[in-house]
C-alpha cells in the first residue's frame, strides 16, 4: 500500500476536522498506521481550519503534508491557499456549492462536487462533509467503504445512534457521485 | 498491547501516565497541551486519582514536590512559559532527590511567543534551567506512540534515580492524533517501596527528611557529589537513541522529536536518488548519546553531520562536543514555530554534499 | 453611545479577532472613550495581560506593554515608578488576575500603587479554551471541572472586589456589568472614577466588570447575557466597594 495523504480545509464549523478524523479512523480500523494533524489555536476562531491525514501500512515518517496528494477545499479562501500546494498529479476536490471559481492548475485532477446540494437532497443539509468523505474514499481507495461506515458508527456512538442511517445515506450519496463526470 | 486507537497526543500522555501507575496530576492550563489536563480531569476520578488545577505553574510544581515527597507517582504537563515558571521548583526537586515527571509540550518563544511546535527549550531542559548543579533526565519522543512508551520509562527512571524526568515534546506531537496502542496497567502495589518518603512515622521508623539544604559547605558538597555519582550511572546505563540507515551512510542527520520524523521522509527521498544519508536520533537528550556520535565521527566513511532543529541551534553544541570536532557539524533550522519542508532540507543536504566533494 | 459609528481615537480602526458576542470589545471601547474624554491619550500606557485580551496588542492606539501571565500589576508598577506623571493601567482577565497573578494584584493594591486595573471577570479561561477560573461559579462544568465545580475539589469562587476592599491601599473599587445598557453606562462611569482616583493620586483603583464568554460557556451571546443576570450577579453583587474621600 502506498502512503495515502489528505488535506481538508474550510471554515470552522463545516465539519472539516470530523471529515479528517473519520478518514483516519477508517484507516485505523483496517489495522493501518494513521496520523491526523489539525491546525489549532486561536487562529481557528471564526477563521479557516484544516487538517492533514496520512494513512499507511508502514510507520509514518512526517505527519506534515506541505504538498498533499489529495486535497479537499470547502470554501474559497481554502482554494486560494491550497490549490498551489497539491502535489503534481494529485487530486483537488472542490465543494462547488460554495466555491464558484474554477481551479487553474492543469497538472492535477479536479473534482467539483456540489456537496451541500447533495447532502440536502440526501436528507441532511449540514452533512456536506460526509458527502465529501464519500468522494475521498472513492477517489483514493485508501480505505474500504465498510470501514468508513464503521468509523461513522463508532464516532456517533450509542448516544447518537439514531443519526446513523441518515449519515450512511449521505455517505452513499457521496459514493454514488460520478467523480469523472 | 490492546487494539489500535486514534488518539490525540496530549490525551495519550495522560492515559499513559495513569497506566504507568500515576494517580496524581497538578497543573495549570496552557496551549498547546490543554487536552492533557482536561483528559486527566475526566479520567483520574474514575481510577480514584486526584486532579487539581493549581493557581499557577509555580504552585503546580510545588504540589508535585509535596506529592512526590509523600511517596506517590505524580506528573504535570505544561508548555514553555509555564515550564519556565517551574524552574525554581525543579531545582528544589532535584536537590531533594524526588521523583517526578514533567511534560513540556514546547511552543515558540521566547516570551509569550506562539503556540506552534518548537525546540527552543533544549538548553533549559538539558542544561538545567533552574539554579544550582543538577540535571533532569530528558526524554524526547518523536511519535505519539513513543510518548506513550517512554512515559512508563520516565516514571521508572524517576523512581530509580530519585530525580525529576522531563519529557520534551512539542506542539505538533501534543495536537496530532495518531493510531496508538497502550500497554496494560502497572500494579501500583508492586512498585518499588519508597522508604525515604515523608509519609509519617506511623510508629514504625525514625523520622525521614526531604530536603535540599545544608548550611555547611562540607555537607552540601557531599550531597552534590552523591547526586553526581547518580548522574554518572545515568550516563552509563540509560542512553537511548535510534539510528536510521547509518550502516553505510556518508552523510548523517542529527535530529530529535518531530524534526526527526520529517528527516525520515527526507531520507526516503534522498536514498531513492542514490544518496547515502542516515539519521541518528537521540531519544534521551540527557544522557546524550555521546559514544554513538563519536563512533560515527571516527568512522572514515562518514563525511559530515547535519544537525536540524526548530531553533537557532542548541543541541548542536552537544553534537559538536560528542564528536570532538572530528567531522564537520553543519546546521539548518527553522524558528518561531515554523516547520521545515522535506524539500527544503533535501536542498540543504545536497548543497553541503556538493561542497564537500 | 450616541455616536455609534465614531471610533474613539484611542482604538485602532481594524477588525477585532474576538468571538461574536464577546464583551471584551465593549469594554475596550469604554476604556477608549474615557481615555479620550479625560484627554489621557498622550500620557497613557496600558499593560496587557495573557488571555484573550492579549490580542489587544493590535487594538489600543497608545503605548502598550505586553506582560507575562498574571504579572501586569508588577510590570505596571515598574512603569509607574519610572514615570510617575503618566497614566498607567492594566487590563486583566480573571485567570490572569485572580489565579496566577493573585499575589501581584493584592500587593499592587495594598501598596496603593497609582495604577488602575480593568478586571474582566467572565468566570472562565477564554484563551486556553474553557478551563475553570477561580471565579467560576459552583457547579459550573468546564474543561477542568467536567463534573461541575465542587467545594471539596475546587473550593469557592473568589470575590476579588470584596477581598481588596479589606486593604487600605485601594482608593476606588467597583463591580459593574456590561450585559445591559444601564450596566454599560455604569461601567463607563466607574472607569471614569477609577481613572480619576489615579490622576488625583488617591491610590490603587480597580473596576471589576462582569462579562461573558459565549464560546467557552457553550452559549449563544444572548443566553450568555442572561446567565450573567441570572447567575453571576447573584454571587457577585454589583456596586462600589471603596470610594476614597475626594472622589
Ligand atoms: C505562565 C503561563 N501559564 C499559562 C499560560 C496560558 N494561558 C494563556 S491565557 C490563560 C488564561 C486566560 O484566562 P483569563 O485570564 O480569564 O482571560 P480570558 O482569556 O478569559 O479573557 C492562560 C492560562 C501562559 N500564557 N503563561
Ligand atoms: S474565548 Fe471567550 S473571552 Fe475569548 S474572545 Fe471568545 S468569547 Fe471572548
Image (cartoon, grey):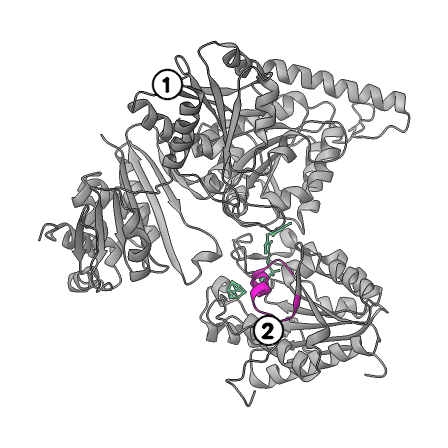
Q: Where is residue C97 in the image (x, y as percent from the top left)?
A: 68, 61
**Residue closer to the observer: B214 or B300:** B300
Letter of the chain that mark 2 sits on in the rendering: C
Q: In this view, does C118 lie above or below B32?
A: below
**Residue closer to the observer: B204 or A96:** A96
The furthest residue to the right? B216
Q: In this view, does B319 lie to the left or right of A148?
A: right
The image quarter in which residue A151 lies: top left
Nearer the observer: mark 1 or 2; the answer is 1
Provide the residue span drawn in magenta.
Answer: C49-63
Note whether residue B175 is visible.
yes
The furthest residue to the bottom? C2
- Report which residue position mark 1 lands on: B276
Q: Which residue is drawn at 71% across and 60% down?
A: C72
For label 1, the crowd category at 10 Å Cα-Cα, with few meaning under 14, some 14 to 19 and many 20 or more, is: some
Q: Residue C28 shows which numbered tag? A: 2
Q: Residue at x 53, y 30 (%)?
A: B140
Q: Where is residue A32 in the image (x, y as percent from the top left)?
A: 29, 32
For label 2, the crowd category at 10 Å Cα-Cα, with few meaning under 14, some 14 to 19 and many 20 or more, is: some
Q: Is residue C67 left or right of residue B302?
A: right
Q: What element carries label 2?
A: helix
Where, quadrant-wise, is the C terminus of chain C in this rendering? bottom right
CA gap between label 1 and label 2 equals 59 Å
Note whether residue A156 is visible.
no
Amino acid at each position: 500500500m502506498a502512503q495515502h495523504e489528505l488535506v481538508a480545509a474550510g471554515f470552522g464549523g463545516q465539519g472539516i476536522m470530523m471529515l479528517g478524523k473519520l478518514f483516519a479512523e477508517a484507516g485505523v480500523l483496517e489495522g493501518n498506521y494513521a496520523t491526523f494533524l489539525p491546525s489549532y489555536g486561536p487562529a481557528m476562531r471564526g477563521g479557516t481550519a484544516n487538517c492533514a491525514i496520512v494513512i499507511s501500512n508502514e510507520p509514518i515518517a512526517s505527519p506534515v503534508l506541505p504538498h498533499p496528494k489529495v486535497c479537499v477545499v470547502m470554501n474559497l479562501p481554502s482554494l486560494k491557499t491550497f490549490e498551489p500546494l497539491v502535489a503534481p498529479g494529485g487530486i483537488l476536490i472542490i465543494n462547488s456549492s460554495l466555491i464558484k471559481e474554477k481551479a487553474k492548475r492543469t497538472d492535477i485532477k479536479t473534482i467539483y462536487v456540489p456537496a451541500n446540494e447533495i447532502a440536502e437532497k440526501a436528507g441532511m443539509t449540514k452533512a456536506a462533509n460526509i458527502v465529501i468523505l464519500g468522494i475521498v474514499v472513492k477517489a483514493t481507495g485508501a480505505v474500504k467503504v465498510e470501514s468508513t461506515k464503521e468509523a461513522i458508527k463508532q464516532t456517533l456512538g450509542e448516544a447518537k445512534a439514531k443519526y446513523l442511517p441518515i449519515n450512511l445515506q449521505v455517505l452513499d450519496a457521496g459514493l454514488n457521485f460520478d467523480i469523472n463526470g | 498491547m490492546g487494539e489500535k486507537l486514534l488518539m490525540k497526543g496530549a490525551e495519550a500522555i495522560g492515559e499513559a501516565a495513569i497506566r504507568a501507575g500515576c494517580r496524581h496530576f497538578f497543573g495549570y492550563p496552557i496551549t498547546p497541551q490543554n487536552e492533557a489536563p482536561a483528559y486527566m480531569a475526566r479520567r483520574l476520578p474514575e481510577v480514584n486519582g486526584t486532579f487539581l488545577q493549581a493557581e499557577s505553574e509555580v504552585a503546580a510544581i510545588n504540589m508535585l514536590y509535596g506529592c512526590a515527597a509523600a511517596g506517590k507517582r505524580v506528573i504535570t504537563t505544561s508548555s514553555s512559559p509555564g515550564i519556565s515558571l517551574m524552574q525554581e521548583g525543579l531545582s528544589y526537586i532535584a536537590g531533594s532527590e524526588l521523583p517526578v515527571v514533567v511534560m513540556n509540550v514546547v511552543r515558540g518563544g521566547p516570551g509569550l511567543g506562539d503556540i506552534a511546535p518548537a525546540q527552543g527549550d533544549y538548553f533549559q531542559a538539558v542544561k538545567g534551567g533552574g539554579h544550582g548543579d543538577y540535571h533532569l533526565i530528558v526524554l524526547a519522543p518523536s511519535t505519539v506512540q513513543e510518548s506513550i512508551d517512554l512515559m512508563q520509562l520516565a516514571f521508572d527512571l524517576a523512581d530509580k534515580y530519585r530525580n525529576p524526568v522531563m519529557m520534551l515534546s512539542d506542539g505538533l506531537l501534543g495536537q496530532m492524533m495518531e493510531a496508538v496502542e497502550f500497554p496494560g496497567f502497572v500494579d501500583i502495589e508492586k512498585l518499588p517501596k519508597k522508604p525515604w518518603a515523608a509519609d509519617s512515622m506511623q510508629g514504625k521508623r525514625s523520622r525521614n527528611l526531604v530536603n535540599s539544604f545544608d548550611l555547611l559547605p562540607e555537607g552540601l558538597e557531599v550531597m552534590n557529589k552523591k547526586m553526581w555519582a547518580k548522574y554518572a550511572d545515568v550516563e552509563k546505563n540509560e542512553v537511548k537513541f535510534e539510528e536510521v540507515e547509518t550502516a553505510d551512510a556518508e552523510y548523517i542527520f542529527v535530529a530529535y522529536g518531530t524534526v526527526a520524523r520529517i528527516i525520515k521522509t527526507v531520507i526516503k527521498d534522498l536514498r531513492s536518488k542514490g544518496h547515502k544519508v542516515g539519521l541518528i536520533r537521540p531519544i534521551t537528550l540527557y544522557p546524550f548519546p555521546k559514544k554513538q556520535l563519536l563512533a560515527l565521527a571516527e568512522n572514515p566513511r562518514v563525511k559530515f553531520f547535519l544537525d536540524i532543529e526548530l531553533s537557532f541551534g542548541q543541541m548542536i553544541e552537544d553534537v559538536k562536543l560528542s564528536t570532538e570536532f572530528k567531522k564537520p557539524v553543519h546546521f539548518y533550522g527553522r524558528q518561531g514555530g515554523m516547520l521545515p519542508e522535506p524539500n527544503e532540507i533535501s536542498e540543504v543536504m545536497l548543497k553541503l554534499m556538493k561542497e564537500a566533494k | 453611545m450616541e455616536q455609534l459609528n465614531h471610533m474613539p481615537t484611542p482604538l485602532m480602526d481594524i477588525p477585532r479577532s474576538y468571538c461574536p458576542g464577546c464583551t471584551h470589545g465593549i469594554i475596550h471601547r469604554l476604556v477608549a472613550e474615557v481615555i479620550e474624554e479625560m484627554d489621557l491619550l498622550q500620557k497613557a500606557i496600558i499593560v496587557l495581560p495573557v488571555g484573550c485580551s492579549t490580542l489587544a496588542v493590535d487594538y489600543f492606539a497608545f503605548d502598550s506593554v505586553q506582560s507575562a501571565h498574571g504579572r501586569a500589576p508588577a510590570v505596571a508598577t515598574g512603569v509607574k515608578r519610572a514615570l510617575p506623571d503618566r497614566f498607567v493601567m492594566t487590563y486583566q482577565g480573571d485567570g490572569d488576575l485572580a489565579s496566577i497573578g493573585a499575589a501581584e494584584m493584592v500587593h499592587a493594591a495594598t501598596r496603593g500603587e497609582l495604577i488602575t486595573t480593568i478586571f474582566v471577570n467572565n468566570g472562565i479561561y477564554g484563551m486556553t479554551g474553557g478551563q475553570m477560573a477561580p471565579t467560576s461559579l459552583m457547579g459550573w462544568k468546564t474543561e477542568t471541572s467536567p463534573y461541575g465545580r465542587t467545594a471539596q475539589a475546587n473550593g469557592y469562587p473568589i470575590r476579588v472586589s470584596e477581598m481588596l476592599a479589606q486593604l487600605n491601599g485601594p482608593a476606588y473599587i467597583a463591580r459593574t456589568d456590561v450585559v445591559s445598557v444601564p450596566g454599560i453606562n455604569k461601567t463607563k462611569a466607574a472607569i471614569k472614577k477609577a481613572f480619576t482616583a489615579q490622576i488625583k493620586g488617591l491610590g490603587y483603583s480597580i473596576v471589576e466588570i462582569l462579562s461573558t464568554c459565549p464560546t467557552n460557556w457553550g452559549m449563544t451571546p444572548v443566553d450568555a447575557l442572561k446567565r450573567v443576570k441570572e447567575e453571576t450577579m447573584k454571587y457577585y453583587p454589583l456596586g462600589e466597594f471603596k470610594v476614597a474621600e475626594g472622589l
